[in-house]
Amino acid sequence: MLRLAITAKQLDIAPYIALASEHRVGLEIQVFGYHPNLLDGDWKDLVRRYKRLLRGFTGERALHGVFYDMNSGSPDKQVRALVRERYALSLQIAAELGARTVVFHANYLPFVRRPEYLPEWTRIQEEFWAGLLQEAERLDLFIALENMWEPNPEIIANLLERIDSPRLGACLDVGHVYLYTDSTPLPAWIDRLRQWIIHIHINNHRGYYDEHLPLDAPDGVIDYRVVLPLLETLPRHPLVCLEMNHPEAIERSLRYLGR
């Protein structure tokens, strides 16, 4: 039985809280990821508003951190300092909202084809996350690194192996695998990341861009009749989040899962 959640990236999360409560599933709040300028405004007031809305909500909670232009593997230390500041604030907000897991992107750049790029990127990332994980431990949070443009699972798996922290895992985004992979099939991604997957995003698309369509979209390229049994074999029973843009698409996907 999958542990399910839904995602909310709109500023008004009330309909998503109601939907999650109705279906007795968790909630991943993505607002601060999709609206990063909120972090320069009165984010504290928004967090207070969300905390009021979440009173009585018993489902699991997660938060998606900022991700636009966040290059934690940058060779520029000033860029990394900015990323660390943004990520640390995301962790603080997650703790305020009672989240357990915070999702961040690793943001590997596959079009940088210098042979030294990947080893240097991995070394810098290792140093970066080692520092941030101390803050995650202080706040009793877990961090999940989400695959975005990584063409194969080895890039994130190697990083997780080197850091080897119980606070750091993987977020498997199934849609991204079908968009950005180098032809490595999903079962290979699952096998390689199996021991670290603590969080999952699922949706569908037509193979051109990340549309966040319902699971059973008639022209979607992902067959969830094949995917879902694979996810059920994962040993850490990750939180599986329906990542769609509108409540109607989420409800349709929940009905599909119910069937």
Image (cartoon, grey):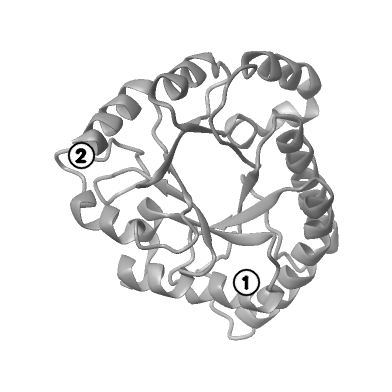
**Residue type beneath disc 2:** Asp
Residue 112 appears in view: no
Q: Is residue 119 above or below residue 174?
A: below
Is tag 2's residue or tag 1's residue first in the polypeptide sequence? Answer: 1
Q: Residue at x 73, y 72 (%)?
A: 126
Residue at the image position 64 percent from the left and 49 percent from the top: 69
Q: Residues within 10 Å of mark 1 (few under 14, many from 20)?
A: many
Q: Secondary structure at mark 2?
A: loop
- Above or below, comparing residue 253 to residue 83 in the picture: above
Residue farthest to the bottom? 115
Q: Is residue 57 above or below residue 129?
A: above
Residue type highlighted by circle 1? Leu
Looking at the figure, which quarter contains the C terminus? top left
Q: Where's residue 100, x and y in %?
A: 65, 43
The residue depicted at 28 percent of the width and 35 percent of the height is 214
- Which residue was labeled with disc 1? 160
Q: Nearer the viewer, residue 203 or 241?
A: 241
Left or right of residue 16: residue 179: left
- Please, which residue is most extreme toward the left here? 218
> Left or right: where does residue 59 sit relative to residue 121?
left
Residue 205 placed where, x, y %?
28, 44
Most foreground residue, 138 or 36: 138
Binning the other alpha carbons within 10 Å of mark 2 as few (below 14), some (14 to 19) or many (20 upward) gives: many
Q: State the separation of the CA atoms marked 2 and 1.
A: 32 Å
Identify which residue is drawn at 26% across, 40% down. Answer: 215
Q: Nearer the viewer, residue 43 or 182?
A: 43
Q: Position of residue 14 (x, y in %)?
A: 53, 14
Label 1 SS: helix
Residue 44 visible in this rendered orientation of the protein: yes
Quadrant position of residue 243: top left
Query: In the rendering, which numbered label is found on residue 187?
Result: none
Which residue in the structure is indicated by mark 2? 216
